[in-house]
Each structure stands twice: as C-alpha cells, then as structure tokens.
C-alpha cells in the first residue's frame, strides 16, 4: 500500500534531484532537497484538509484533482505564479520575467525583490482565505470537539449570523491599520477583501450544489426503499444515508475542485515566498517546491483518504484547522514583520502532532472500555 501510494513521489524526487544536479551541480541538488523538505513540512496540514474535502468527492473528481490539480499546483503555483507576479507588478512579459529570474542584474530590481515587494497583498489574500476557512470550522456546531474548553464556547457564539465575516473584517482592519506598512494599507485591504470574497463564493457554490445533490439522493433513496418489499431486499440495499456516503459529482464536484485549488494556492503562498530566502532560481523552486513537495503532499492526501486515517484519528481534522488558523495569523502578521519559515512549519507540526496524540489516546480509551464491557 505504502509503495503504491508513495512510489511515484519517490521516483519523481530522484528524477528531480538528478535534474537539479545536471542543472546546477551539488549546490542546486542540495537547495532542491531543502526546498522539498520545507514544502512537505509546511503542507502536512494542507494534506489533511485536502483529504477531508476529497473524500466528499466522487471518484471521477478525485482523479481530476490528483492529476490536473497536481499539475496546476506544480507548474501553476510554483512556477507560473511567481512569474505572473513579476509580470503584473513590474510590467514585464513572462519571457522577460523568466530571463530576469535566470539572469539577475547586478543593480536595480531583481526577480526576488519584486516577489518580496508583492508579499503584503499575497499574504493578505491567502491569510484572509485561510482565516475564513478556520472560522467556519471552529464556529460551526460539531458532535466531537478536540479543545473542548475553547471550541464549545466558540460554537455557542458562532450561532450569531455571519459572525465569521464580522471577525474576519475586524482582523483585516487591525492588520491594515497597525501591521501593514503605510504605503500598503489600501492594497492589503483590497487583497484581504478579495480573499474573503473568493472563499465565500467558491465554498458557498460548492455547498449549494452539494446540498442539492444530497436532496436528490434522499429522494432516490426513499423511492428505492418504497419499492423494496422484502426484508432481504431492504438489507441488501441498506446504507448510512446521503449525508455520509453521497459523493459530490457534476457541479458540486467541480466547485469542490475549485475550492481545493484555491485552498492549495493559499497554502502555497508562504512556501513560495519563503523559498526566496533560500534561492531565487525559478527552476530550483519548481523542482523542490513543485515536483518534490507537491507530489508528496498529493501522496499524503491519497494515503489519508484510502486508509481512512481521518476516521480512525478523529482529531486530525481539528488539529489541521487550528494549524490553518495559526498559519492565517502568521501570514497577516508577516505583512509587517518577517516570520522565519521554520516557525510556520513547526507551529503546524506541533498542532497536528498534538491532535494525533489525542486521537491515539481516545482510541485506546475506547478500546479499553469495550474490553471492560465484554
């Protein structure tokens, strides 16, 4: 199972390292490896969240995300996205932007400096998108909680209409007023608002069509049950209900796919920006972050879905969402102050690790109760 899921990622890693060595020698190989490790460490929470959404999608849309979606993640976010930033902010066409990246000038604006200057609006967009995702989770009423002492009170106040929007706008105003540089306040406000609008639109459309599909499944299930006259037939066609087993197809699947792509992009912002602290070479960034990092995140996502890990370790989803909330705050704070990438990675790892340990303890306690009741 492990070899089948991770085999392609290991193969692409080896190929990427060989290409890096041929491209720039031992230094390029080392930098590519470091970037790959950086991306995986920063994106484990991304894989958990991807898995929670992916298991709601039909097999067709799962395959679309794991193929086309990965290509977008590899080449779109890790190669084309930085070039597009240079193209839009510096007025250079894509060819000139790539030439600037591969041949940095001795004086004047460099590819790295242009990307760094664009950080406030990138962080504002990604930070607000992820913040909306986090608030939508912690303010929603759930059967199971992890950090009960804080999650239950948040669920109670979450009954207030559109509270997540109010909190997000308030934090965006604070960020623009007290954290963002003076000349970037308006830009941060616009980019943050676009991040919120994108989340509301894509997530809302996905939920809308997903709900319509559930209603259709419920109607079909009722009709099927009415036609089943014998107990054997009923038993043979029993199911847990559309809320658990229905898979998003058609428009619902498409909008969940878009949601995952925007989500992946938001997770990628810190990794792409952080990569420039290591190297500004777009080829090395594409090999390390894109081919190695993105492929391992894909494999982790597949592993979590196929193994049913999220069902066994029930707090992983909670830990991932708290990691998302932390990442959102870090992105917003980084608009005014640089935050080392190792801090970002460690916060996510610690939160997910704590959630995993809590899940293991819960499983052992439940198994002990079952044995005691026998």
Image (cartoon, grey):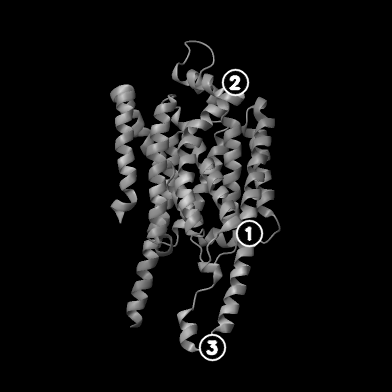
Q: Nearer the viewer, mark 1 or mark 2?
A: 1
Label for residue 229? 3
Percent across and percent down for residue 146 are 48, 61
Identify the element where label 1 is drawn: helix
Identify the element where label 2 is drawn: helix
Residue at the spot of label 2: 90
In the image, farthest residue toward the bottom:
230
Percent across and percent down for residue 247 are 52, 62
Q: Nearer the viewer, mark 2 or mark 3?
A: 3
In the image, farthest residue toward the front:
227
x 57%, y 83%: residue: 227
Horizontal side of 84 relative to 274 (left or right) equals right
The answer to whether marks 1 and 3 mark residues whose Cβ atoms lie closer than 8 Å is no
In the image shown, does 51 or 357 lie closer to the viewer?
51
x 49%, y 40%: residue: 72
Q: Residues within 10 Å of mark 1 (few under 14, many from 20)?
A: many
Q: Which quadrant would the N terminus be assigned to in this image?
A: bottom left
Horizontal side of 324 relative to 196 (left or right) equals left
In the image shown, does 56 or 159 lie closer to the viewer?
56
Q: Quadrant of residue 158?
A: bottom right
Judge whether 236 appears above or below 331 on screen.
below
Q: Earlier in the sequence, mark 1 or mark 2?
A: 2
Label for residue 209? 1
Horizontal side of 286 relative to 176 (left or right) equals left
Residue 81 visible (yes or no): yes
């Amino acid at each position: 199972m492990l070899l089948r899921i991770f085999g392609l990622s290991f193969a692409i890693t080896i190929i990427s390292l060989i290409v890096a060595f041929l491209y720039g020698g031992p230094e390029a190989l080392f930098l590519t490896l470091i970037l790959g490790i950086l991306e995986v460490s920063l994106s484990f929470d991304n894989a958990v969240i991807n898995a929670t959404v992916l298991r709601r999608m039909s097999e067709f849309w799962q395959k679309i995300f794991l193929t086309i979606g990965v290509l977008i993640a590899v080449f779109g976010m890790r190669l084309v996205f930085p070039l597009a930033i240079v193209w839009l902010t510096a007025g250079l066409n894509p060819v000139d932007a790539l030439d600037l990246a591969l041949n940095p000038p001795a004086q004047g604006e460099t590819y790295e400096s242009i990307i760094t200057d664009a950080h406030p609006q990138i962080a504002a967009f990604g930070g607000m998108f992820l913040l909306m995702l986090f608030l939508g989770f912690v303010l929603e009423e759930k059967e199971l909680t992890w950090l009960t002492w804080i999650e239950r009170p948040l669920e109670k106040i979450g009954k207030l209409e559109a509270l997540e929007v109010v909190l997000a706008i308030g934090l965006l105003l604070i960020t623009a007023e007290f954290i963002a540089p003076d000349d970037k306040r308006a830009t941060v406000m616009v980019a943050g608002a676009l991040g919120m609008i994108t989340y509301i639109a894509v997530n809302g459309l996905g939920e809308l069509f997903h709900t319509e599909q559930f209603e259709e499944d419920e109607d079909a299930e009722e009709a099927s049950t009415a036609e089943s006259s014998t107990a054997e037939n009923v038993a043979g066609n029993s199911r847990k209900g559309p809320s658990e087993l229905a898979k998003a197809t058609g428009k619902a699947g498409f909008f969940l796919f878009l949601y995952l792509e925007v989500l992946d992009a938001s997770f990628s912002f810190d990794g792409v920006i952080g990569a420039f602290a290591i190297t500004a070479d777009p080829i090395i960034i594409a090999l390390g972050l894109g081919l190695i990092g993105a492929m391992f995140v894909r494999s982790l996502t597949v592993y979590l879905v196929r193994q049913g890990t999220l069902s066994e370790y029930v707090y992983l989803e909670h830990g991932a969402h708290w990691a998302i909330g932390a990442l959102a705050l870090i992105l917003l704070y980084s608009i005014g102050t640089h935050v080392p990438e190792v801090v970002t990675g460690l916060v996510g790892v610690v939160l997910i690790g704590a959630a995993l340990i809590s899940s293991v303890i819960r499983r052992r306690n439940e198994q002990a109760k079952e044995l005691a009741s026998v």
